Image (cartoon, rainbow, N blue to C red):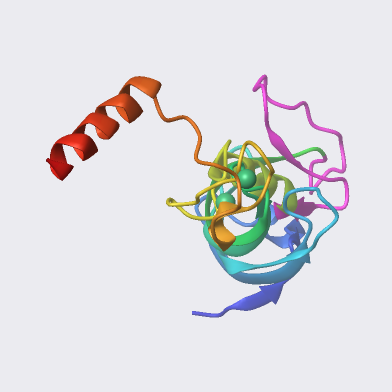
Amino acid sequence: MEWRWEAMQINVAQQLRAPIGSIRDYEVSEIVDVTDDGNGSLVQGKVSLMRTDRGILVKGRLDTEVELTCSRCLSLFNRPLALNIEEEYFPTIDVVSGASLPLPDELSCFTIDEHHVLDLTEAMRQCALLAIPMKPLCGEDCAGLCPNCGHNLNQGPCNCPPQGVDPRWSELSKLNKEKGTE
Ligand SMILES: [Zn+2]
Ligand SMILES: [Zn+2]
């Protein structure tokens, strides 16, 4: 199999002229601002492009790592993301006649631009948005911040007095202690 190294933008002019069902494989590798926060992440993977009756079907898996803020302790951490992409892209221009083409009535559809360039970035971003949890945690056992002084409890306890103990329980434990000394 012949692999082609590409950026996230792939010129598909030739493939649009190819018969339906023809497949081309690409290996992509590019720095992309996945989460739109100004930080670039290296995105790498393999995609398969298949000519369909309407356009080009993209299937593949891309791997990247994004920087997220923990929703509990507010610290930054890196999280790997595996993005499984499967999207159909539609041409806006007929590759043979140069005439503009109507787009299908689908709510969200990806397009191949007038230079016959298919941009994987948008599909990848959409996939990443779904893969990133709404409330990211730096770890399942993240201890969070002290509600009193804001100290990051993952770095050890703070000097605040213990909080949130039900007074009835403290009465009970006092009783138990008294019993224990009898
Ligand atoms: Zn955390
Ligand atoms: Zn504290």
Tell me, yes or no, if residue 57 can be seen here. Answer: yes
Residue reaching furthest front?
Answer: 182
Tell me, yes or no, if residue 80 can be seen here. Answer: no
- Magenta-tinted stretch: 93-120
Residue placed most toward the observer, 18 or 36: 36
Q: Quadrant of the C terminus?
A: top left
- 54 is within the stretch colored magenta: no
Q: Residue at x 67, y 21 (%)?
A: 107
Q: Residue at x 55, y 58 (%)?
A: 154
Name the main secondary structure of what is drawn in magenta. loop
- 100 is within the stretch colored magenta: yes
Location of residue 6 with respect to 177 vertically, above or below: below
Q: Quadrant of residue 133?
A: top right
Apparent side of residue 180 relative to residue 37 in the rendered image (left or right): left
Apparent side of residue 150 relative to residue 130 in the rendered image (left or right): right
Q: Quadrant of residue 181?
A: top left
Location of residue 104 with respect to 134 vertically, above or below: above
Apparent side of residue 132 relative to residue 97 in the rendered image (left or right): left
Provide residue 99's location: percent of width, then percent of height. 87, 36
Q: How many marks?
A: 0
Provide residue 120's location: percent of width, then percent of height. 70, 53
Residue placed most toward the observer, 27 or 93: 27
Apparent side of residue 157 relative to residue 11 in the rendered image (left or right): left
Q: Residue at x 63, y 41 (%)?
A: 129
Residue placed most toward the observer, 128 or 115: 128
Provide residue 52's location: percent of width, then percent of height. 56, 44
Residue placed most toward the observer, 167 or 179: 179
Residue reaching furthest bottom?
Answer: 2
Provide residue 139's location: percent of width, then percent of height. 48, 55
